Amino acid sequence: HSEQQQRHNLWKARHQLYYATLALRPGATRALITDACVPMSQFAHLISTTAQDVQSLQVVGPCFGHAGDGNFHCIMPLLEHDSQDYLDRVHEVNHNLLQRTMDVGGTCTGEHGIGYGKISYLQQQCGHGGIHMMNIIKQSLDPHHIMNPGKILHFTSS
């Protein structure tokens, strides 16, 4: 295989990973996808402790990462009628992963951003001053709050 073909095959496998993970829970149509990035010296520890959480909390959630940059994920497939207990355990895996990430100097943003689900973690990571600066930048670039309204930064009416 050529280098280009090998690269194509790796990207194809990576893109199919989400659907392969859904297949681990027949009937799953969506998943909670974690996303964090840690210093490489902490990479193996974070993946192994997250895998231990998945096992001990009895949820489905394969863990994988990018070997070169410290970014890793745990994909936890969800069923439409999962019990609240199961959902709570899925969120506990996510919380533990993000908390451990920040405890070792990593970032909760990984490669997929903050959205709604990680706002409190970003605030913990960056502190009041960091969030305040982000608000100033956001206000200057988007004074009418039309770009991703309500995500990450919240404004009061001007």
Image (spheres, grey):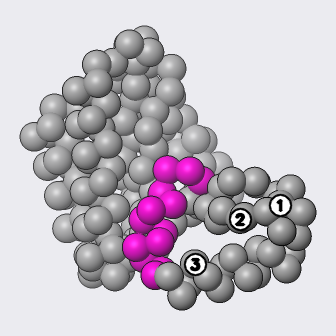
Instruction: Please give left or right for residue 56 compared with residue 23 in the image.
Output: left
Asked whether disc 3 touches disc 2, contact meaning CB atoms under 8 Å apart, the reply is no
Q: Earlier in the sequence, mark 3 or mark 2?
A: 3
- What's the magenta region? 115-127
Q: Quadrant of residue 100?
A: bottom left
Amino acid type for the residue under numbered disc 1: His
Closer to the chain start, of discs 1 and 3, is 3
**Camera-nearest residue between 9 and 156:** 156
Q: CA distance from mark 3 to mark 2?
A: 12 Å
The residue to which callout 2 is attached is 155
Residue 81: % across, % down: 38, 13
**Which quadrant of the figure has residue 154?**
bottom right
Please tell me which residue is depicted at 40% across the width and 41% down the height of the picture. Answer: 75
For the residue marked with disc 3, what is the amino acid?
Answer: Ile
Judging by the rendered image, the residue that carries numbered circle 1 is 145
- Regarding residue 7, the answer to whether it shows in the image is no
